[in-house]
Amino acid sequence: MSEPAEDSIFEKALKRLDTARKYATIDEETIQRMQHPIQMLHVSIPVRMDNGTLKIFEGYRVRHDATRGPTKGGIRFHPQVNLDEVKALSLWMTCKCAVLDIPYGGAKGGVIVNPKELSPMELERLSRGFIDKVADFIGPDTDIPAPDVYTNERIMGWMMDEYSTITRRHSPGVITGKPIALGGSLGRSAATGRGAYYCIKELEAKRNWDPHQIRVAVQGFGNAGQSVAQLLHRDGYQIVAVSDSKGGIHRKEGFDIPSLMKTKNESRVLKAVYCEGSVCEAIAADKITNEELLELDVDLLIPAALENAITTENADRIQANVIVEVANGPVTLEADEVLDAKKKLIIPDILANAGGVTVSYFEWVQNRCGDYWSEEKVNTRLEQAMRQQFEVVYQLMEQHQISMRTAAYASALNRIGAAVAATGTARYFSGQE
Ligand code: GLU
């Protein structure tokens, strides 16, 4: 094996564990295990394109750690997917499931592709082709995928169907984030944003915020960004800026989020509009870039797009005092130091966006029992889980005077470490415990 590159995102993810280990009660073997994903699969997927030509796509599935249960994590379709990134994302899943105390380990998958360039039928062939190549690797008791960046319910449905065809067994529990009609859970599609919303509500209570006074900027107006913006808007928060991959809009008076969602989801274009019924009218707003959005004078910044949005390049220009990481890894290791020094509060990804995997777990439980829950039950259980684990992390932060990120990793390590210890460590085998 070659030496890991200095800018390896997996190595940087491990450094965060290294910082947190001092605040967790764990055996050294826990860290040793975290350093090595248990299985990594690299696949080539031949796809017949609509014009008759053959195209080969490359994909990965990494199972990081299975000490606490079957491995769990999404599949992303994105041109920048690479093995190092998938490894880092799988490690974050291990930690995320532990922070929420969900009985899963972590995994992640990805295919190098820009799905926006594929026709619907090409996308279906690619989705089924990927499952064909990883079918021996995944399963309801071993490794359970889900949606991630640029994958959605429909893709999960195709994937579940393909797996069921291969195994000759209806297997809804092999994948989560499915359409409701194919065994998906009510409340799953909004769950990532809703989980982040409960974290913000916890903070609102601690800091005595008046929502009407809180200005919010949301980078990334996809599934998670839309849900959190919608819930905050409903409570009176001022959503003054939003963006998608093509750029953003800014308006001091705030936006009507249901109107933005309506046009974005109907036309795929983010426009400053106000809708009454089905009639939408353009409203005055400034066009801004994604970079400008991050540096706006707001109270709450929600990066909900991709990794590495906030780096040492822009960290010292971030004005928001609170950052809620709805994306995975939007703040780099180095940028963390700059923001910590400025006393910014970051609600870290492994807590803030864990609502998605929490409801994925509920979906899997429902699939396995064949007993389906009401949306109210899903949301109530999600709220309980998020608020409870937010408190655990917040208390660790206050007790040790550390960042919320370090506290979240310490909480994860405590739980992973307990499972590692239960299997027996060197201390046990040498008779010391
Ligand atoms: N892709 C999501 C995440 O990063 C969801 C994973 C899941 O539901 O398994 O947390």
Image (spheres, rainbow, N blue to C red):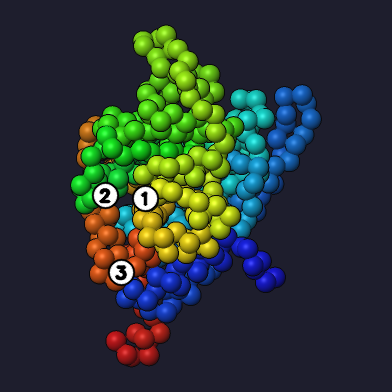
Q: Earlier in the sequence, mark 3 or mark 1?
A: 1
Hey, what amino acid is under mark 3?
Answer: Gln
Secondary structure under tag 2 reads helix
Q: Are marks 2 and 1 in contact (CB under 8 Å)?
A: yes
The furthest residue to the bottom? 431
Seen in the image, is 392 located left or right of residue 89? Answer: left
Residue occupying the point 26% across, 65% down:
398
Q: Could one spot residue 5 in this view of the protein?
A: yes
Image quarter in which the C terminus is found? bottom left
Q: Is residue 125 above or below residue 341?
A: above
Q: Are marks 2 and 3 in contact (CB under 8 Å)?
A: no
State how far apart marks 2 and 3 are (Cα).
17 Å
Q: Position of residue 196 (x, y in %)?
A: 34, 44
Q: Position of residue 401 (x, y in %)?
A: 30, 69
State how far apart marks 3 and 1 are (Cα).
17 Å
Q: Position of residue 216 (x, y in %)?
A: 38, 38
* Depth order, front residue of 29/116: 116
Secondary structure under tag 3 reads loop
What residue does disc 3 label? 401
